[in-house]
Image (cartoon, helix red, strand yellow):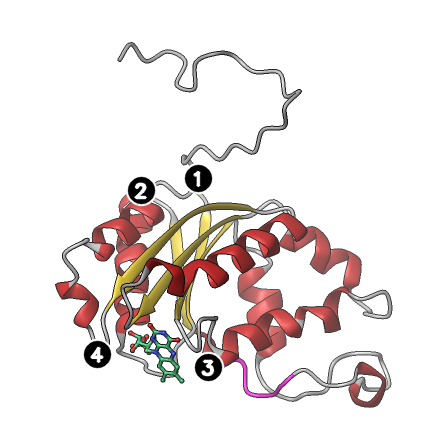
Amino acid sequence: MKKVLVLSASPRRDGNSWTLAQAAVAGAREAGHEVEFAHLNDYVQGLFRDCRTCRDATGACSVGDRYDELLLEKVVPADGLVVATPLYWYGMSGALKTFYDRLFCHTSGSAPDGDAVVAGLTGKKVALLISCEESYRGATLGLTAQFQELARYLHQDLVGVAVGVGNSRGEVRSDPSLPLDQAADLGRRLFDIRVTDYRIDTERSNRVWAGRTS
Ligand SMILES: Cc1cc2nc3c(=O)[nH]c(=O)nc-3n(C[C@H](O)[C@H](O)[C@H](O)COP(=O)(O)O)c2cc1C
C-alpha cells in the first residue's frame, strides 16, 4: 500500500479541479492505496518572500500560514502526488505556483531542514489534472511542459496528464473526452504506469511490454 496525496489547487472548493481530484481519489482508493485529499488554499496564503528578511531566529520560514504542515506532514511522506489545478492565464493557479516557489524556503542551502525535505521530495510518482475552459490543445502545453521540468528537476516521474474542459462548477463531467475516467485511471495506476525517457544509447529490448503476446 502506498501513500497518495491528492491536492486541489483551485480557490473554488467544489469546482472542476476538485471534481477531477475526487475521481483520482476514488481511483487510488480502488487500487488499495492510503489516500489523503487537501485543498491547497487551506494551507498556502502567503507569497514567497526574501528569505533573509523572513526567516525567524531558528532559520525557519515565518510566513505564518499552514504551508509547512502541508509540505512536511502531507507532501513529503507521500509516495505519489496528484495535483489538480485550473488553468489560469495558460499556467497553474497562483496558489500552486506559490507552493512551488516556497519549496525554495525548505530546499535552499540556508534552509535548516533542506536535506530531509529534498530527500522527501524525490522519487515520487506525479500526475497532473488540469481543468480549463479552452479545448484548444495548445492552451495546456505550457503547463504540461512546466510540470515535466518540475518532475525532472525534483527526480520525480510525471506519469500522466488529464485535461478536463469545462467552465461552470463541475462542468468537466460533461466533457465527452471523459476526463474523470482519465483522472480515476491515473489515480488507480499511479505506481504502475510505465514512464520511460530513453537516450540514443539506452540499452533496451525491442519489446516495450515484455511478457505480453499481443
Ligand atoms: C483567473 C482565471 C484565469 C483563467 N485563465 C484561463 C485560461 O488561460 N485558459 C482557459 O482555458 N481557461 C481559463 N480560465 C477558466 C478556468 O480554467 C476554468 O473555468 C476551470 O474549469 C476552473 O476550474 P475550477 O472550477 O477548478 O476553479 C481562467 C479562469 C480564471 C478565474
The tag earlier along the polypeptide, 4 or 1, is 4
Q: Label 1 amino acid?
A: Phe
Q: Residue at x 24, y 77 (%)?
A: 167
- Predominant SS along the magenta part: loop
Within-10-Å neighbours for mark 3: few <14, some 14–19, many 20+: many
Residue bearing mark 4: 169
Residue bearing mark 3: 41
Q: Label 3 amino acid?
A: Asn
The tag earlier along the polypeptide, 3 or 1, is 3
Between circles 3 and 2, the one closer to the viewer is 3
The tag earlier along the polypeptide, 4 or 2, is 2
Q: Is residue 44 highlighted in magenta?
A: yes
Residue bearing mark 2: 31
Q: Is residue 150 highlighted in magenta?
A: no
The percent position of residue 125, horizontal first and vertical second, equals: 50, 46
Which range is magenta?
43-47
The tag earlier along the polypeptide, 3 or 4, is 3
